[in-house]
Amino acid sequence: MTPLNTFGAIMSKAIELESALADYYGRAGDSERARASEKRRQKMMRIRREAVLEITLEAIVGLDSDDYALDLDDTSESGQARVASTAARFYREVAPGINVRQARSALERAAREHAGE
């Protein structure tokens, strides 16, 4: 279990998640989703670098990395839907714990994109 109890842990998980999704969608033959995941990964990396000076060190509780495990072996349409749903849930659940407006906004936007909204 890896607790997601800091800004850095959440942003690192988001970067890791988008990197894995970019590879996954590439293998599944969905180049549009792969490019979108890579774009989100780069954005999360930029936000982590820029916002690290702005964060207030408030504890984030109740989130664990294992709750957002992805099944990256199933590249079927239903498998891709489950992966996107898990990614959207991750972003929806972690965004409220982030007190940096730009980062919270990016996480909320990622949730909507993964949910197809």
Image (spheres, helix red, strand yellow):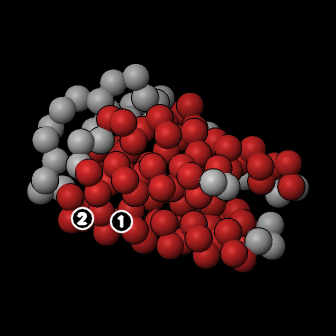
Q: Residue at coordinates 23% horizontally, 49% vertically from top-left?
A: 100
Q: Residue furthest front?
A: 117
> What quarter of the picture does the C terminus occupy?
bottom right
Up the image or down, 83 lies above or below 102; here it is above
Q: Which residue lies furthest to the top in this view?
A: 62
Up the image or down, 35 lies above or below 109; here it is below
- Left or right of residue 98, residue 29 in this image: right
The foreground one among 101 and 47 is 101
Q: In the rendered image, is residue 1 in sight? A: yes
Find numbered disc 1 in the image and state the secondary structure of the residue it sits on.
helix
- Left or right of residue 95, residue 47 in this image: left
Q: Residue at coordinates 76% horizontally, 71% vertically from top-left?
A: 30
Q: How crowded is mark 2: few (under 14 residues within 10 Å), some or many (20 or more)?
A: few
Identify the residue under disc 1: 45
| Residue 4 place in picture, x, y as percent | 38, 35
| Residue 93 place in picture, x, y as percent | 47, 35
Residues at discs 1 and 2 in contact (Cβ within 8 Å): yes
Count of marks placed on residues: 2
Label ID, residue 49: 2
Give residue 38's quadrant in the image.
bottom right
Q: In the rendered image, is residue 17 in sight? A: no
- Left or right of residue 34, residue 109 in this image: left
Specify the amino acid type for callout 2.
Arg
Q: How crowded is mark 1: few (under 14 residues within 10 Å), some or many (20 or more)?
A: some
Specify the amino acid type for callout 1.
Met
Q: Residue at coordinates 64% horizontally, 50% vertically from top-left?
A: 115
Find numbered disc 2 in the image and state the secondary structure of the residue it sits on.
helix
Up the image or down, 13 lies above or below 47; here it is above
Disc 1 to disc 2, C-alpha distance: 6 Å
Q: Residue at coordinates 87% horizontally, 55% vertically from top-left?
A: 76
